[in-house]
């Protein structure tokens, strides 16, 4: 970008965020309850996701006794060499495993 001035102290500027290239899509319908639902656990293998998921399972089962979990061990790291392929495969894997929702845990 070059600064252009007409000599009156006014400069042409460009919005720094740029032009939006993708249209926004509506959010997926939210679940009315987690009771009886299956939740996938996704983790990037950084920080302490293994500990976080233990605590989350415990607390969620107190509130929703019928909730089920598909462990992060089932999916592997979401931040690895095959990250792109793993993430692309998730919709099909979720369908195969009967997953209703997912929790993604990552390092801070």
Image (cartoon, rainbow, N blue to C red):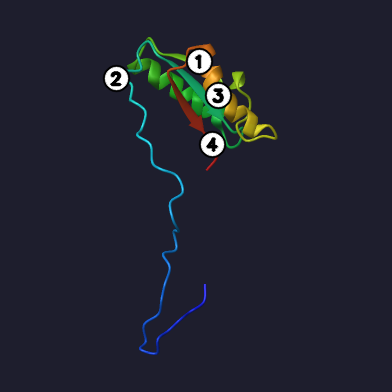
Precedes in sequence: disc 2 or disc 3: 2
In three-dimensional space, the C-alpha distance between marks 3 and 4, rounded to whole angstroms, equals 17 Å
The residue singled out by tag 4 in the image is: 106
In three-dimensional space, the C-alpha distance between marks 3 and 1, rounded to whole angstroms, equals 8 Å
Q: Are marks 1 and 2 in contact (CB under 8 Å)?
A: no
Point out the frontmost of discs 1 and 4. Answer: 1
Precedes in sequence: disc 1 or disc 2: 2
Q: Give neighbour class at mark 1: few <14, some 14-19, many 20+ (Cα, 10 Å).
A: few
Point out the frontmost of discs 2 and 3. Answer: 3
> Horizontal and vertical percent for residue 30?
33, 25
Precedes in sequence: disc 2 or disc 4: 2
The residue singled out by tag 3 in the image is: 90
In the rendered view, does 99 fall on the left or right side of 36?
A: right
Task: Identify which residue is drawn at 35% across, 15% down.
Answer: 64
**Secondary structure at numbered mark 2:** loop
The residue singled out by tag 1 in the image is: 95
Q: Give neighbour class at mark 4: few <14, some 14-19, many 20+ (Cα, 10 Å).
A: some
Precedes in sequence: disc 3 or disc 1: 3
Q: Are marks 3 and 1 in contact (CB under 8 Å)?
A: no
Point out the frontmost of discs 3 and 4. Answer: 3
Question: What is the number of the mark on residue 55?
Answer: none
> Horizontal and vertical percent for residue 66?
38, 9
In three-dimensional space, the C-alpha distance between marks 1 and 4, rounded to whole angstroms, equals 23 Å
In the rendered view, does 46 fall on the left or right side of 15?
A: right
Task: Identify which residue is drawn at 60% across, 36% down.
Answer: 46
In three-dimensional space, the C-alpha distance between marks 1 and 2, rounded to whole angstroms, equals 19 Å
| In the depicted structure, whether residue 4 falls above or below residue 88 | below
> Horizontal and vertical percent for residue 5?
42, 84
The residue singled out by tag 2 in the image is: 32
Precedes in sequence: disc 1 or disc 4: 1
| In the depicted structure, whether residue 42 falls above or below residue 12 | above
**Secondary structure at numbered mark 4:** loop
């Amino acid at each position: 970008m070059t600064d252009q001035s007409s000599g009156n102290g006014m400069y042409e500027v460009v919005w720094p965020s740029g032009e939006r290239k993708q249209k926004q899509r509506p959010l997926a319908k939210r679940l009315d309850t987690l009771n009886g639902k299956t939740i996938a656990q996704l983790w990037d293998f950084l920080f302490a996701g293994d500990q976080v998921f233990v605590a989350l399972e415990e607390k969620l089962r107190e509130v929703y006794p019928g909730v089920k979990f598909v462990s992060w061990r089932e999916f592997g790291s979401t931040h690895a060499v095959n990250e792109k392929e793993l993430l692309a495969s998730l919709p099909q894997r979720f369908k195969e495993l009967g997953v209703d929702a997912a929790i993604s845990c990552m390092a801070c």
